[in-house]
Amino acid sequence: LRGRVFSALRPVLRQSARANVFPAMSIKAAGVRGLKSQPHGGKLVNRMVGEEEGKEAVKACNGLTMELSERQSCDVELINVGAFSPLEGFMNEDVWTAVLQDMKLPGSGLLFGLPVVLDTNRDDLIPGKKVSLTYQGVPLAVLDIESRWKPNKVLECKHSYGFTTLEHPGVRMISMERGHHYIGGKLTGLAIPKRPFPSITPADTRANLPADKDVVAFQCRNPIHRAHYELFIRALDAPNVEPGSVVLVHPTCGPTQEDDIDGVTRYKTYEVLKTELNNPKVHWSYLPYSMHMAGPREAIQHMLIRKNYGCTHFIIGRDMAGCKSSLTGEDYYGTYDAQDLAKANCEELGMQVVPSLDLVSTDQGYTTVDEAKAKGLKVNKLSGTEFRKRLRAGEDIPEWFAFKSVVEVLRAATK
């Protein structure tokens, strides 16, 4: 599996490894706070409008509405607030094709990891119409429909994930959850969805970050345990990170693969840990993003999103955004495929990569695998299966593995 997917991504990797032809970092964005990192494309998109303009936009829809799924509502929100800058709406077919084939936006040539599309099975949503997009009955945006097409989903899965088998969760999502047609066009933003967790906009997140320091982004989709904490704290000491910098812990709290812990529980674990750590070097924010489990290409997507949130560096973990076959349990992506693609594209993207350290817990605390071997240290081990077993049974979980506050939240959620 690993060899086949990396072969599928090689053309994109080779093309993206060229010299930085589009130096987005050098573009000064009007109205954007002067952080070290500028938004992708130089300008932070904001599609939100005032109340009166919003009413007029809804009126122009002539009663045409479309109720969104949770995944779709995440994409609408991220477009509206600029997390997907420079996108101003859902991709049209030409943009969808270019991103799939070359991982580039046509015209600007800016890198973009994965398509952002709106799917439907309805026949009345056609170009020239405007539709009010609602979530839980609340209008979030108006879509000015510019295009409609029937996508080649096999091609989309092959380019996005490197695979077309339903054993891959992203392939299942595209094949079984999405509608038969895609519609594209610009959005007029009306409201932010009410969610169980606060989703701070890129503009507000940037306003709370130090203007003169590196900002290292840590992405996760699971509760943070001790090894994760050690990883992102030690990233501040990486050779390419300036002294005195900060880390932005920026978990995705939207839909993910089927067997992951739900977003509300994940959010609660982050909140108790934030209180427990109380570390001024650690900033927290939550991202309403829908995971694709696309491995290398999703790493690029995460990097450009965090660039829009004001980050200068991005921690790339082993097998980032990876997944396993639902039949064989075999990994779809190689351990360092995401790191390799990120390193090949980071200069053009205007972000720096911080590869995650291979850390282990020992009788002398956390250290790298190599140092533990060199010093002959005893390594502490606890498998994920054993952790979940102890969690359900109420048995002791060592603090070198998990924070007590996080364990308490997880135990409460399993009752």
Image (cartoon, rainbow, N blue to C red):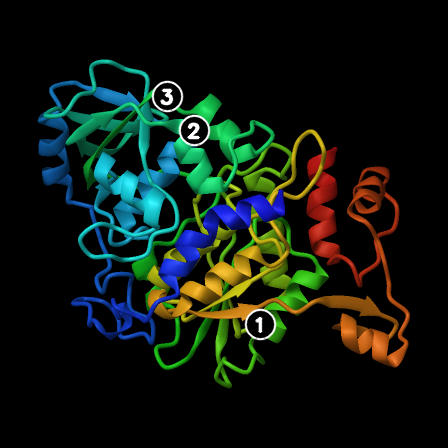
Mark-to-mark CA distance, 2 and 1: 46 Å
Residue that label 2 marks:
154
Amino acid on which disc 3 is placed: Gly
**Nearer-N-terminus badge (3/1):** 3
What residue do we see at 41% from left, 53% from top?
11
Quarter placement of the C terminus: top right
Q: Is residue 225 visible?
A: yes
Image coords of residue 53 (percent x, y): 10, 39
Image coords of residue 184 (percent x, y): 22, 33
- Find numbered disc 2 in the image and state the secondary structure of the residue it sits on: helix
Residue that label 3 marks:
179
The front one of 211 and 1 is 1
Disc 1 packing (10 Å; few <14; some 14–19; many ≥20): few
- Find numbered disc 1 in the image and state the secondary structure of the residue it sits on: loop
Mark-to-mark CA distance, 2 and 3: 14 Å
- Find numbered disc 3 in the image and state the secondary structure of the residue it sits on: loop
What residue do we see at 75% from left, 57% from top?
402
